Image (cartoon, rainbow, N blue to C red):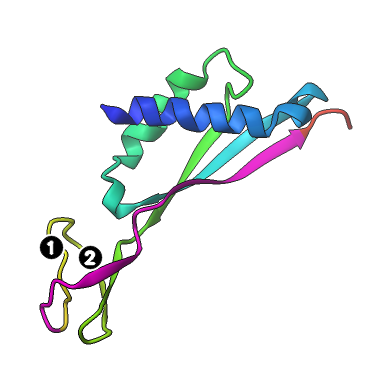
């Protein structure tokens, strides 16, 4: 279950990024991540692991919001774009050529931290 390790990494990034605001009494309410289809991460398992990883930390009771990014390929032969439904078929959906580039779907990025100011 690599989702546990991924949750730990996301939590570490979030704590470092929000450090100054946390020191002033802020609370992280949401950590938003983009996870591409090609990363083969089970979002439900990632969110489940988040509660264990953040328990007793500055991120305790925060929510992990996962944005699912579809895998999209661009064919170098015909220029068509294909949205993948199967991660094992990296071919153009129009002409069947295998000379494709990944346009999206391989990202794993912390895109936002929502921090509530508790100082009024």
Residue hosting label 1: 89
Q: Nearer the viewer, residue 5 or 56?
A: 5
Judged from this view, the residue extending furthest toward the right is 120
Residue 29 in the image: state x and y as whole percent: 63, 34
Judged from this view, the residue extending furthest toward the bottom is 78
Could you say which quadrant of the image residue 119 lies in?
top right
Q: Residue at x 59, y 16 (%)?
A: 57
Q: Secondary structure at mark 1?
A: loop
Q: Are marks 1 and 2 in contact (CB under 8 Å)?
A: yes
In terms of sequence position, does the residue under pointer 1 or pointer 2 come before the other?
A: 2
Residue 24 in the image: state x and y as whole percent: 83, 25
Could you tell me what secondary structure mostly forms the magenta stretch?
strand
- Left/right placement of residue 28 relative to residue 95 reads right
Could you say which quadrant of the image residue 96 lies in?
bottom left
Whether residue 107 appears in magenta in the rendering, the answer is yes
Residue 14 in the image: state x and y as whole percent: 59, 33
The label shown at residue 12 is: none
Q: Residue at x 49, y 33 (%)?
A: 10
Residue hosting label 2: 84
Q: Please state the extent of the stretch shown in magenta in the rendering.
A: 95-116
| Quarter containing the C terminus | top right
Whether residue 111 appears in magenta in the rendering, the answer is yes
Q: Please say if 97 is above or below 89.
A: below
| Quarter containing the N terminus | top left
- Left/right placement of residue 94 relative to residue 103 reads left
Q: Residue at x 28, y 69 (%)?
A: 101
Q: CA distance from mark 1 to mark 2?
A: 8 Å
Q: Secondary structure at mark 2?
A: loop
The crowd level at tag 1 (other Cα within 10 Å; few <14, some 14-19, many 20+) is few
Q: Please say if 76 is above or below 52.
A: below
Residue 67 in the image: state x and y as whole percent: 44, 51
């Amino acid at each position: 279950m690599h989702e546990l390790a991924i949750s730990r990494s996301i939590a570490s990034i979030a704590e470092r990024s929000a450090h100054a605001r946390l020191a002033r009494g802020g609370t992280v309410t949401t950590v938003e991540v983009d996870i591409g289809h090609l990363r083969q991460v089970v979002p439900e398992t990632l969110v489940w692991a988040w509660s264990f990883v953040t328990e007793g930390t500055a991120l305790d009771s925060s929510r992990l919001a996962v944005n699912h990014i579809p895998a999209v390929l661009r064919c170098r032969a015909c220029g068509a774009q294909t949205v993948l439904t199967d991660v094992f078929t990296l071919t153009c959906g129009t002409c069947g050529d295998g000379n494709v580039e990944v346009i999206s779907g391989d990202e794993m990025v912390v895109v936002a931290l929502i921090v509530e100011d508790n100082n009024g």
